[in-house]
Amino acid sequence: MSRRLSRLAGALALSCAALLAVPATAAADPAPADPLARAIAALQGQDGASLAAANAIADSRTPVAENTSADPFAALDAANKALTDFGITPFFYPTAAINCAATPGAPLGIVPGVAGGAGGPWPRLTVPPIATLPGLPSIPVPELNAVNKGETMFAFVPAGIVNDSADKSGMQVAWFNVNTLQGGFADFGGLVTTMAQSILDNSGIPAEFKDMARPLVVNALNALPAAGARAVPVQTGSGTVLAAVFGTVNHKAIDGSDKSCFFFPTVGLVNVA
């Protein structure tokens, strides 16, 4: 995405957030611009993903939407609650895609969405021991995490998409660690599938038992929304991580027509241990 297009998308993201009149949700105040600006200055003259990601985030940032008591989209509240209940910190303001709703009736066909991040170790799931053959002891399962120390799980949840089973590509995160000056881009995958695989990869469970453990992990994640939801684990390193989430979700409307929704950038901050 070009710098000019990123600025335009960031401005439109704020406009959509104001149109939706939803409360801004944040666990912490936005990071001051100076750390990112200093990091960009330090990286000048260097090529690579870190500088590109830092510039993408800087060009996407907009003022945080004002709080308001009116919220016409209960689904967006539910998406925010799904993230926070699972320990994911929502970004500073929501985003939206226009002319994208799966069902008729939404003003301008708007589909709102929220993004967030969680620093590892997360989500610290516990599951029952895995049963084995009769007469043999069950296999204890250690605490399960999708991301470990120095890693971040980014998530995106739109409200109003009912069927995106054919294509999970299109959404992207640009991230930048202001402490290490490292950054980059990562592509999202399906939320539950990505998290389940990441948890199993980090579990230490022997390969021959992972298929037995998979249903337990998936069941533990069933509280999360599925349609349109995305996730990606990233080795961000420890520190203060700024991120911008944007991209496209392809899905089918109730009438069977194909929809392609571009979500404007939404920006957030994650403190990673």
Image (cartoon, rainbow, N blue to C red):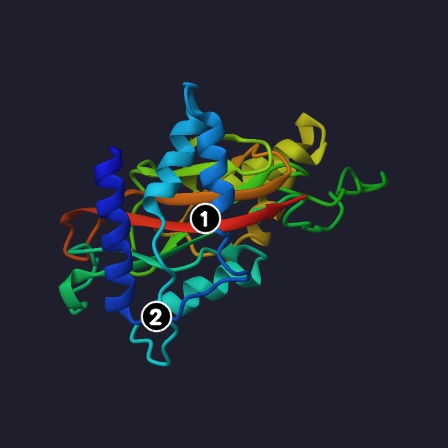
Which quarter of the picture shows residue 28? bottom right
Left or right, 265 with reference to 142: left
Q: Toward the viewer: 37 or 272?
A: 37
Asked if residue 62 is positioned above or below residue 192 in the image, the reply reads below
Counting residues from the start of the chain, the first of labels 1 and 2 encountered is 2
- Residue 209 is situated, as x and y percent measured from the top left of the image, at 68, 32
Percent x, y of residue 250: 25, 43
Query: Which quarter of the image is occupied by the N terminus?
Result: top left
Q: Position of residue 173 (x, y in %)?
A: 41, 39
Q: Which kind of residue does numbered mark 2 sit on?
A: Val
Is residue 45 in view from this perspective? yes
In the image, which disc is placed on residue 22? 2
Q: Who's the residue at 59% across and 57% down the image?
A: 87
* Percent of width and height locating residue 148: 66, 38
Tag in front: 1 or 2: 1
Residue at 54% x, 38% y is 178
Local secondary structure at mark 2? loop
- On residue 71, which mark appears? none
Amino acid on which disc 1 is placed: Ala
Q: Quadrant of the C terminus?
A: top right
Cα distance between the residues tagged 1 and 2: 24 Å
Kindly identify the residue that appears in the image at 19 percent across and 57 percent down: 254
Q: Which mark is residue 33?
A: 1
For label 1, count other residues whose C-alpha is less than 10 Å away and answer few (under 14), some (14-19) or many (20+): few
Q: Is residue 137 left or right of residue 43?
A: right
Q: Is residue 223 visible?
A: no
